[in-house]
Image (cartoon, grey):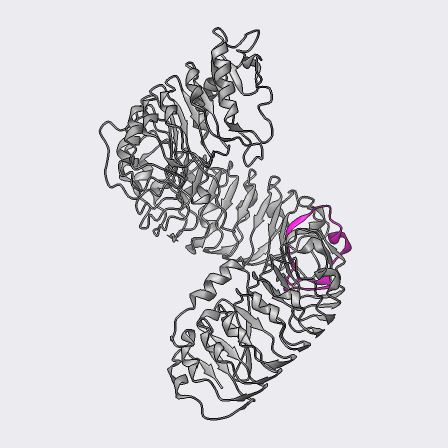
């Protein structure tokens, strides 16, 4: 789940700064009592309103002749009556966002010190240049207001400005705002807060020289600005005041050396850069540091002891790098840490008990501890149970083994997330055990929890995500579990031996019950489900209630392979536009492929090993993004359609094996440049093998991964897609390695003539008949 990009927190040392902003915003908030606004300023505000688009009539109080000091969003000075502040921010993503144009009548507001237009919708215009003439401004917030174009340099004339936020949504990767130089910022001598996140500063090579010399600057946010390396080192005249530095999501290939001259820094965020190399020891010299985020920065060293010397550190994330070695016992020096994330490094190794056993009291404030996906080993550390403040504990995908006792959890009363799948651990608490915690997330996949279904789960009333897959459970799914008051986001019970009927599942996002012994009709589902995996069970009955339910058409992956379903596939697919993976193989389905099944977003269609018949519907031509089409082991007939090669140009796997197709192999098949697996065996196909098969370029390159496969797999949200290929009489299942496999089987047909010598050019072909 690595996942989602977490916002790096602000340290508590920023409290004085936050109080300053509050003072700017509210120092005159009692200003409107018994005051009448100045007529020229009221007229200026009305002109300003008239050029705005106000879809929800937010400014309905702004009327001719009214007292503008009582208008919504307007604050007047408490003694002079001058308009001093305009609070016109919209709620984020709100339909009430203001738009239109910004009238220069605002220049009539000579005493305006505070202007907030954030979260509005001005996407068709640039930031007005006349804003640089509002010389009384101390606070200007235009963040996420969708302004476009160059940032006007005359904003640098606002010498009284203390707070400037032009930040945009860095996840949009649009870079609507641009600046080729930041020299204009050097005029903002009073500036304490600067946020240009999401602006394109790729040509602003002076960003370090300018920003690091602002004498009053406390916070600098340049996230997602396309910044590249600046090798300069500023030691003379560099700011002594900067306490928060955010350079995340840029293109830095090394830590800017200038950072290490900023000894007052309290927070450094460099996540999602390409820093590479070792973690610099210099971080240990920034002794006031409370927040350090180096997530996903390609660092590839051991963790230096200098980091462990930062005893004020509260937040440390080294996640998603290539760190190696052991976790030093010096970690105990991090006595203030509340968030420690070392996950997704793959190469961190050693036994946690030796480095944590005697440190639990030193780490008593720890709330978040994550070492997911490393090579840590040994038994489960009992000392985790002493971390009384712990809310998130992640140690899944490591090599821990042994027995976990219920007493290890006795003090974890605040635990909300336990992420521990894929270890060799056994947990068999007393049947009367009541956990002291209420978790939102429990991941215990690949633990040994059985043979009985875990009774202690009945006390978890707030569960959103549960994974107890492959847990050695041999039991009937208890009724109490199906009646839990919680609504799951995700439920994974796969690869157990659970049995019984499943009448209803209250799950909103993903269900995986595959490889169990469930029986009865398909379960009823909630309307916003996205992924449903039920393969390798004994579900029976018809598909109609599921497929023809209009509330379930948001499903993206539907896998009911290897069950006991009967009847025809209903013709109710017109509204299943989100579906990308459909697997109904190995059931007892009959009749023809319904015409509505062909739609443009489908990537995988598997109907193999049923009793379906008829010709392929021409509507399948609409599924132009298909990468895998498996219709093998049915009773389909007619010619192999030429449109398979003409319209389905992205096909990587095409299997029509063991049907009743006749006619010739269409030459259009040769146009499938990504095709790696072609199986037409056991049909009634006649004629000669087309010489143009040498055009199948994906089979003509040896030992080369097909990037088409990899790219399309990511579109299916990285869920496992399998293609069953019959290779020389043996069925092999290919999943993530599919891009390396090439095969062709034309055997047991009525083909005539010799095998074309051109097929010899397919040097990548690994199997053939």
**How far across and how far down the image is residue 292, in percent?**
40, 39
Q: Residue at point 57% right, 12% down?
A: 65
Which residue occupies the foreground of this view, 539 or 526?
A: 526
Is residue 28 depicted above or below 320 in this figure?
above
Q: Is residue 110 above or below residue 584?
A: above
Give the camera-side residue of 206 and 365. 206
Q: Is residue 286 above or below residue 71?
A: below
Residue 424 in sight in this render: yes
Asked whether the viewer can see residue 566, the reply is no
Identify which residue is drawn at 63% across, 79% down.
633
The number of discs equals 0
- Magenta-tinted stretch: 472-501
> Residue 269: x, y in percent?
39, 39
* Residue 370 shown in magenta: no
Left or right of residue 463, residue 378 in this image: left
The one nearer the camera, 199 or 469, is 199
Q: Nearer the viewer, residue 97 or 161?
A: 97
Q: Is residue 588 above or below residue 151?
A: below
The picture places residue 379, in percent across and down from the top left corner, at: 52, 55
- Taking the magenta stretch, the answer to whether it contains residue 482 is yes
List x then y, in percent, for residue 578. 60, 57
Left or right of residue 475, residue 327 in this image: left
Which quarter of the figure has residue 290?
Answer: top left
**Left or right of residue 548, residue 265 in this image:** left
């Amino acid at each position: 789940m690595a996942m989602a990009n977490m916002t790096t927190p602000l340290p508590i040392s920023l409290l004085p700064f936050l109080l300053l902003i509050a003072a700017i915003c509210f120092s005159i908030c009692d200003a409107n009592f018994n005051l009448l606004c100045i007529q020229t300023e009221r007229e200026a505000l009305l002109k300003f309103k008239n050029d705005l688009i106000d879809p929800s009539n937010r400014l309905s109080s702004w009327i001719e002749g009214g007292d503008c000091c009582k208008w919504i969003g307007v604050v007047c000075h408490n003694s002079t009556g001058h308009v001093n502040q305009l609070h016109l921010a919209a709620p984020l993503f709100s339909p009430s966002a203001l738009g239109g144009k910004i009238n220069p009548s605002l220049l009539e507001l000579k005493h305006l010190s505070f202007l907030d237009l954030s979260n509005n919708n001005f996407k068709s215009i640039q930031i007005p240049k006349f804003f640089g003439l509002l010389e009384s401004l101390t606070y200007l917030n235009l963040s996420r207001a969708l302004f476009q174009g160059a940032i006007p340099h005359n904003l640098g004339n606002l010498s009284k400005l203390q707070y400037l936020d032009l930040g945009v949504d860095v996840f949009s990767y649009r870079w609507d705002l641009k600046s080729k130089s930041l020299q204009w910022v050097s005029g903002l001598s009073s500036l304490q807060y600067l946020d240009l996140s999401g602006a394109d500063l790729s040509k602003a090579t002076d960003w370090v020289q300018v920003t690091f010399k602002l004498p009053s600057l406390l916070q600098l946010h340049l996230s997602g600005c396309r910044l590249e390396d600046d090798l300069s080192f500023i030691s003379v005249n560099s700011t002594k005041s900067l306490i928060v530095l955010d350079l995340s999501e840029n293109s830095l290939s090394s830590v800017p050396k200038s950072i290490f001259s900023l000894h007052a820094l309290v927070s450094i965020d460099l996540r999602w850069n390409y820093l590479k190399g070792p973690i610099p020891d210099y971080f240990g010299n920034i002794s006031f540091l409370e927040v350090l985020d180096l997530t996903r920065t390609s660092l590839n060293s051991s963790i230096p002891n200098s980091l462990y010397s930062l005893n004020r550190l509260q937040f440390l994330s080294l996640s998603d790098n290539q760190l190696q070695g052991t976790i030093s016992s010096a970690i105990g020096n991090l006595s203030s840490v509340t968030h420690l994330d070392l996950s997704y490094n793959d190469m961190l190794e050693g036994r946690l008990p030796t480095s944590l056993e005697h440190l639990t009291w030193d780490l008593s404030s720890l709330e978040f501890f994550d070492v997911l996906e490393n090579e840590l080993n040994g038994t489960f550390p009992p000392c985790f149970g002493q971390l009384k403040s712990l809310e998130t504990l992640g140690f899944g995908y490591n090599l821990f083994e042994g027995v976990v006792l219920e007493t290890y959890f006795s003090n974890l009363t605040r635990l909300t997330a336990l992420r521990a799948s894929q270890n060799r651990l056994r947990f068999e608490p007393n049947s009367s055990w009541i956990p002291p915690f209420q978790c939102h997330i429990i991941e215990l996949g690949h633990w040994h929890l059985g043979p009985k279904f875990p009774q202690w789960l009945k006390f978890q009333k707030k569960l959103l995500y549960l994974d107890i897959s492959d847990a050695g459970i041999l039991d009937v799914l208890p009724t109490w579990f199906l009646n839990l008051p919680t609504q799951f986001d995700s439920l994974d019970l796969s690869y157990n031996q659970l049995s019984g009927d499943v009448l209803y599942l209250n799950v909103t996002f993903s269900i995986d019950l595959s490889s169990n012994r469930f029986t009865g009709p398909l379960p009823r589902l909630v309307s916003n489900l996205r992924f449903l995996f039920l393969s390798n069970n004994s579900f029976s009955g018809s598909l109609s209630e599921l497929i023809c339910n209009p509330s379930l058409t948001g499903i993206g992956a539907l896998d009911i392979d290897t069950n006991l379903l009967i009847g025809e596939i209903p013709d109710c697919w017109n509204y299943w536009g989100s579906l990308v993976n459909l697997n109904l193989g190995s059931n007892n389905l009959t009749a023809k492929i319904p015409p509505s099944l062909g739609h443009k977003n489908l990537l995988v269609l598997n109907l193999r090993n049923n009793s379906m018949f008829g010709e392929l519907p021409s509507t399948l031509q609409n599924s132009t993004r298909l990468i895998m089409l498996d219709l093998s082991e049915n009773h389909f007939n007619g010619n192999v359609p030429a449109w398979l090669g003409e319209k389905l140009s992205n096909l990587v796997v095409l299997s029509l094996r063991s049907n009743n197709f006749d006619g010739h192999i269409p030459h259009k098949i040769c146009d499938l440049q990504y095709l790696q697996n072609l199986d037409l065996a056991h049909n009634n196909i006649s004629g000669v093998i087309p010489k143009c098969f040498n055009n199948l370029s994906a089979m003509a390159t040896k030992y080369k991964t097909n990037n088409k496969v990899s790219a399309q797999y990511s579109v299916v949200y990285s869920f496992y897609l399998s293609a069953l290929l019959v290779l020389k009489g043996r069925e092999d299942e290919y999943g993530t390695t599919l891009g390396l496999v090439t095969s062709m089987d034309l055997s047991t047909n009525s083909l005539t003539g010799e095998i074309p010598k051109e097929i010899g050019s397919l040097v990548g072909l690994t199997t053939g008949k």
